[in-house]
Image (tube, rainbow, N blue to C red):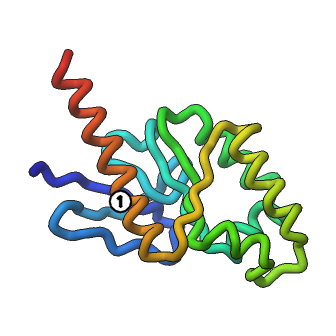
Amino acid sequence: MERVTLIADSREQEVYAFDPVQVDMVRRALPAGDYSVEGLETRVAVERKSLDDFVSTVIRGRARFHRELALLQDYEAACVVVEANLADVFAGRYRSAAHPASVFGAVLSIILDFGIPVFFASDRQIACRFTQDYLLRFHRNHQEALDAQ
């Protein structure tokens, strides 16, 4: 199996520990998102968020986040991965006074207004696995398309 190099954005605070058998990791600035595939940095990206960070970003940092989403919506594949369940949003299990309906409205805006899926991945470990497999699948599909030419 070919090893794939994944990139973690240099500004990412809590970098995922991907499977070292399948993945090499490098850190450098990405144009958008927190994780991508080397050589495909403007085609695929994952934006990672803890629940507290997600809520803060969509409520208080909305303008900056919308600029990031505007970049991501031009990618072939991009998504936001939240390290929590949607039930955590509705239960208000975050450090913010934001109403759960406002947070959920922001989720729907990301999905419908920007066309970027938001995946609630239960916890950090599952979000890490999702991110790795999402990027590896995109890489494999890209390679298969190149091989078919």
Q: Quadrant of the C terminus?
A: top left
Residue most toward the left? Answer: 1
Query: In the picture, residue 35 is in which quadrant?
Result: bottom left
Please say if 40 is above or below 120.
above
Position of residue 131 in the picture relative to residue 31 (left or right): left
- Nearest the camera: 70 or 143? 143
The picture places residue 132, in percent across and down from the top left corner, at 35, 59
Residue under the point 48% across and 33% down: 76
Q: Secondary structure at mark 1?
A: helix
Residue 14, percent from left and from top: 49, 77
Q: Residue furthest top?
A: 149
Residue drawn at (26%, 54%), measured in percent from left and top? 5
Please rate how many residues cluster around mark 1, counting C-alpha atoms within 10 Å: few if below 14, some from 14 to 19, many from 20: many
Which residue bears the numbered disc 1? 132
Residue 83 lies left or right of residue 27; in this view the side is right
Image label count: 1
Q: Position of residue 78 (x, y in %)?
A: 52, 44
Q: Residue 107 appears in which quarter of the rendering?
A: bottom right
Q: Position of residue 31 (x, y in %)?
A: 53, 47
Task: Identify the residue at horizontal 62%, vertical 53% (top origin).
Answer: 118
The residue drawn where x is 30% and y is 50% is 136
Where is residue 18, by image quadrant? bottom left
Of residue 44 and residue 88, the one placed in the foreground of this image is 88
Position of 120 relative to 113 (above/below): below
Name the amino acid, label 1.
Gln
Q: Is residue 42 left or right of residue 81?
A: left
